[in-house]
Amino acid sequence: MTNSRCRYISLLLVVLIFLLRVSAQAALPRRVIIDTDPGIDDAMAILLALNSPELQVEALTVVAGNVEQPQGFENALKIVSLAERCDVVVAGGAKHPLNQKLITAQFWHGKNGLAAVELPPAKCKADSRFGPDLIIEMVHAHPHEITLIPVGPLTNIALAVSKDPSIVPLVHDIVIMGGSVSGGNVNGASEANIYNDPEAAQIVFNAGWIVTMIGSDVGERTLITRKRLSELRESHGPESNFVAKLADFYLTRAEKSGYSGAAMYDPLAVGTVIEPTLVTLKAMHVDVETKGEFTRGETVANRMGSNENNVLHGDHYEIEGVIELKPNARVCLASDANRFLDLFIARIKGK
Ligand SMILES: [Ca+2]
C-alpha cells in the first residue's frame, strides 16, 4: 500500500470515529434538573419533561414561589409518583426569597397550587439534601452535561452559584422561565418569577454563563386553548387526566381575566430544551432592576449591545462614543406556538 493511500485510509477512519461520537452524543438524552415551584404550569412542564425521550430528568429541586415551599415539595413528590418515576430525585430548597417576603399565587394556581386537584399520596421518597447543594453535587458529578431549567423564582440557583461559582462553566446550559422584554405579568414592568426574587435573578444573570430566557411575553403568545384541551381529552390516562383538570382550571381562570387561552410559561422552557427550533432567540445583555419604584424585578434587556459613554465636561456630560456590553442572555422573542402545543399534547395525551 502506498503512503498516500495509507494516509487516506487513516483520515477516513478518524472522520468515521468522529461522526460516530457526534451521533452517539446526539442520541443521548440531555440530563436536566428542573428547579420548580409547582404550580399548574410547573406540573405540566415536569410531566412534559418526564415523557420526553430527549431528556433525562435527574432531579426536581423545589423553591418557594407559587406556593410555600413545603406545599410545592409535596406537590413535586406527588407528580413524580403519579408518573411512576421514583428514580427522579426530589429535594427541597429555599423557603423564602433572598431579600424580601414571599408572594404566593394561589389566585392563579388553586389553593394547593395544583388547581385544588387532590392527587394520591406520594409513593416516592424525598431526598434529604438541600436543593442548591444537590445542584452543586450533580453538576460536579456530570461536568458539562447538566442543563438547568429553573421555572420558579431563582433563589435556589442564586444560592448554588454563590456557594460554589465553579459550577458555572460546568453547566451545559441554563434555560429559565422568567422575565420579559415587553412588560410584565405582575405589573407594568415585572414577570412573577423575577419579581419574587429580583436579587437572586440579578446574581443568576450575571453569574458568567449565558442564560436562555423564556419570558412571560412569549409564554402569553403560547396558549393552551379549549380546542387543545379537547384534543388532550381524546384519550385517557392518569397523567393525561390530571393535566386536563389542571388545564381546565387554568383556562377558566384565564378566561375570567379576558384571555383566550392559558399561557404555557414553564412548559415552553422545557420545550425549548427538547426542541430548540421552537423558539427564536437573540443575544442580549440583561440586568435585573432591584431598586426601581415601579420597575423592581424588571429584566432590563439591552437590544443594542452597548451603553452610551457619558463623560463629565465642566458642568455637563457629553456622550463620548459607546461602551460595548457582552451578552449574558439569549432572549426568546417568539415561539412556534402551534408546533409546541402539538408536541405537548402528543407527549401527554393518553399517558
Ligand atoms: Ca413555576
Image (cartoon, helix red, strand yellow):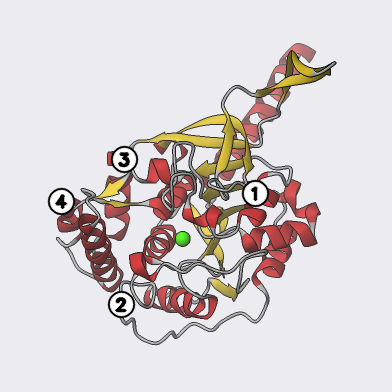
Which residue has dot 1 on it? 291
Secondary-structure class at tag 4: helix
Q: Position of residue 317 (x, y in %)?
A: 76, 18
Q: Which mark is residue 238?
A: none
Question: Which mark, residue 337?
Answer: 3
Q: How far apart are labels 1 and 4 at the CA level?
A: 42 Å
Label 1 SS:
loop
Asked whether disc 3 touches disc 4, contact meaning CB atoms under 8 Å apart, the reply is no
Crowding at dot 4, Cα within 10 Å, few <14 / some 14-19 / many 20+, comes out as: few
Q: Amino acid at mark 1?
A: Lys
Residue at screen point 59% across, 54% down: 148
For badge 4, the amino acid type reads Lys
- Image quarter of the C terminus: bottom left
Disc 3 within 8 angstroms of ligand 1 (CB): no
Residue 240, by quadrant, is: bottom left
| Residue 43 horizontal/vertical position (percent) | 40, 65
Instruction: Write down the residue under mark 4.
Output: 227
Q: Amino acid at mark 2?
A: Ala
Amino acid type indicated by mark 3: Ala
Query: Is tag 2's residue or tag 4's residue first in the polypeptide sequence?
Result: 2
Residue 330 placement: quadrant: top right
Earlier residue among tags 3 and 1:
1
Mark 1, other Cα within 10 Å: few <14 / some 14–19 / many ≥20: few
In this rendering, does residue 217 appear at all?
Answer: yes
How far apart marks 3 and 1 lie (CA) works out to 34 Å
Residue 202 relative to residue 269: left or right: right
